Amino acid sequence: VSDMDTEIREQPGIVASLAAADSTPYGEVCRAAKSAHVQFVLYIGRGTSDNAAVYGQYLTATRAGLPSGLALPSATTLYEAELNLRHSLVIAISQSGETPDVAETLAYAQTQGALTVAVTNNISSPLASAASWALPTSAGIERAVAATKTYTAELAVLALLWATWADDRSLLADLRETVPAAMQQALESSDSVNALAPGLVDSEQLLVVARGYNLATALETSLKIQETAGISALAYSGADLMHGPIAMLDPGMPVICFAPSGKTQGSMLQVISTLRGRGVRIVLVAPESALALLDPNQRPGSQTRKGRRKEKDLEWVPLMEVQEVLSPLVAIIPGQLLACNLAVARRRDPDRPRGLSKVTHTR
Amino acid sequence: VSDMDTEIREQPGIVASLAAADSTPYGEVCRAAKSAHVQFVLYIGRGTSDNAAVYGQYLTATRAGLPSGLALPSATTLYEAELNLRHSLVIAISQSGETPDVAETLAYAQTQGALTVAVTNNISSPLASAASWALPTSAGIERAVAATKTYTAELAVLALLWATWADDRSLLADLRETVPAAMQQALESSDSVNALAPGLVDSEQLLVVARGYNLATALETSLKIQETAGISALAYSGADLMHGPIAMLDPGMPVICFAPSGKTQGSMLQVISTLRGRGVRIVLVAPESALALLDPNQRPGSQTRKGRRKEKDLEWVPLMEVQEVLSPLVAIIPGQLLACNLAVARRRDPDRPRGLSKVTHTR
């Protein structure tokens, strides 16, 4: 068993612990930001943590009503732009806390008047020291180079922070119980994911599509597949896909679609209908209710309930439904398992992707 | 000759005209935004216009010292987030001005207290009507579905706006003369680009890499190659590439690297050195000075001056050097020509990518 597989399976427990832990630091950050009249949130992250930041951006809009952006590290580290960051909250996300340009950009933001927060798995890292508040992801040491448990832990910390801001008790309650249970179920019903790998092992390219909160899920699934399985996976929002990239979809090309729940589900199902007309091979990660919406005339049989239904052009990976804002914590699990399975099927070591190390030194 | 090819060749003239036109509207926007104490800029765009917005973000940081973000249309159109946009400048970019969710998001921003600007090629569009100021791209009707001349016109309008903010006269002067001349030269010395197509025609995947201002160039080159040639092209910043995707680079995989000038050039040349160690096939789009930095021991011969030097692992596409902040207007031209050539070589119609229309209806 690979470290990556082991760490994927630790996730429900880590999220449950984070949700049960002392929430004082979240309250402190929110109080400070509100009394500083923060107008805008800037996220800093690279790779997996950048994908967590995309989730953070949607939370920031829906839970705090604030606009946000992803930092452009080279604007400050290379071009030496003088940013005015008064009234900004800057949130840097990094598993190791040691990527130099992330820590440097946060330290710079501090000097420019921003309130600064580090979300990191290493509370004694340079990044944690540079920030006014450090919010630990408490996922334990991550041995695999491909980040999995620290990704969902980052999502959980961001959800806790913004739920605290909005006093969203339903989110806080679901993060404690419903979400870990749904994550556990995604791990236990992994047959449908395992069944995918043989059919995808020879694909040199595939697409991953989602919308809204789960745009992060599409980005992170494609990154995991790139780094562990070495397949050229492209991620798109369902809306952006229609602006050009749809032209490159040849019949038979695999397209992984996430439609876990909520307001984006309808628009994802429209995207899927368009894709089916083009003969691509769809993998739909969604609860059974979404499947029913897609094919209203088709009654699910016993095969469907096990999540192994395979039609000519659509394979289904079932998910337990949770409220949409928390669905990225559950929906990423099939994506991680698929990346890990594909790596093994392609005779690669999922724990040691070629040419990567755990801390990336970029400026 | 395709419309796409014709429109690519119109670009130097369009940029020169935009730079020579009345600058009153730019001054008005800047004065209004400064007196409203704008703290933050939000860009709205999809597809090609989203790539122009990435360029806009770097300009906003370096010319105005303001943080910025890309809007999340689904946060407002689907999740109905209540954004506080007082002290925000919202800039929507759209060739047609008719993409419903772009116009809707801008109209929403207006109601939330933002100053709003439309950058569009259709001054009588719903988007232009909804905005407080409309800045025309004046590129004439674009017939090809793949946007080319409206992309560089969008870049030029953004450069004019932020140069006006900073009173950057060197930028304004270069946009009038040096840049159109360098664009013209890129069109005239297209032999080196034409020479690439036969070697890339059978590639099902390739990578496009750049940094800083030219991250937009990488994103737009990959989008053009996807939509016209149907090749799965991935764009990365040089820094992000090291965080995972580098693991999927097999020997022989084509990687197009942009290193046109300035402060990011050194970091791009480092990326290229790393890539050469992995045996990938590099296409370097850069002035001759960058080539000299890469191989300090090698003297360029006469073959080099024509831009047709071909080493075992590196092909070179020459560019005339302009100041880095304006280099995306020049560097995109080889990217556009390559996409158009590759489409023809793959027996596709560059003017009518499969499954695309000129206005995209998404919500």
Image (spheres, coloured by chain):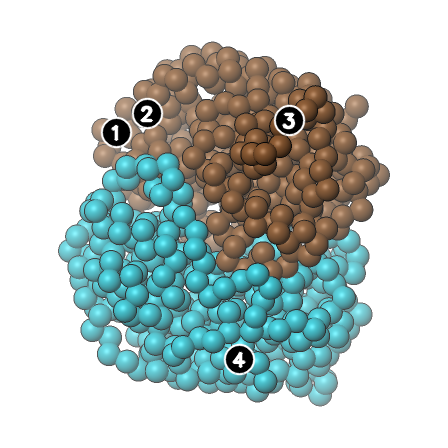
Chain colours: A brown, B cyan
The x and y percentages for residue A23 are 40, 15
Q: Secondary structure at mark 4?
A: helix
* Tag nearer the camera, 2 or 1: 2
Disc 2 from disc 4: Cα separation: 52 Å
Q: Which residue is mark 4?
A: B3
Q: Which residue is mark 2?
A: A165
Q: Which residue is mark 3?
A: A300
The x and y percentages for residue A267 are 47, 42
| Same subunit, tags 2 and 4 | no
Q: Give the residue displayed 53% in from the left and 80% down from the top.
A: B3
Disc 4 from disc 3: Cα separation: 49 Å
Tag 1 and tag 3, C-beta contact below 8 Å: no
What chain does badge 1 belong to?
Answer: A
Callout 1 amino acid: Lys
Q: Give the residue displayed 71% in from the left and 38% down from the top.
A: A311
> Is residue B222 in sight in this rendering?
no
Picture quarter containing residue A9?
top right
* Tag nearer the camera, 4 or 3: 3
What chain does badge 2 belong to?
Answer: A
Above or below B222: residue A139 = above
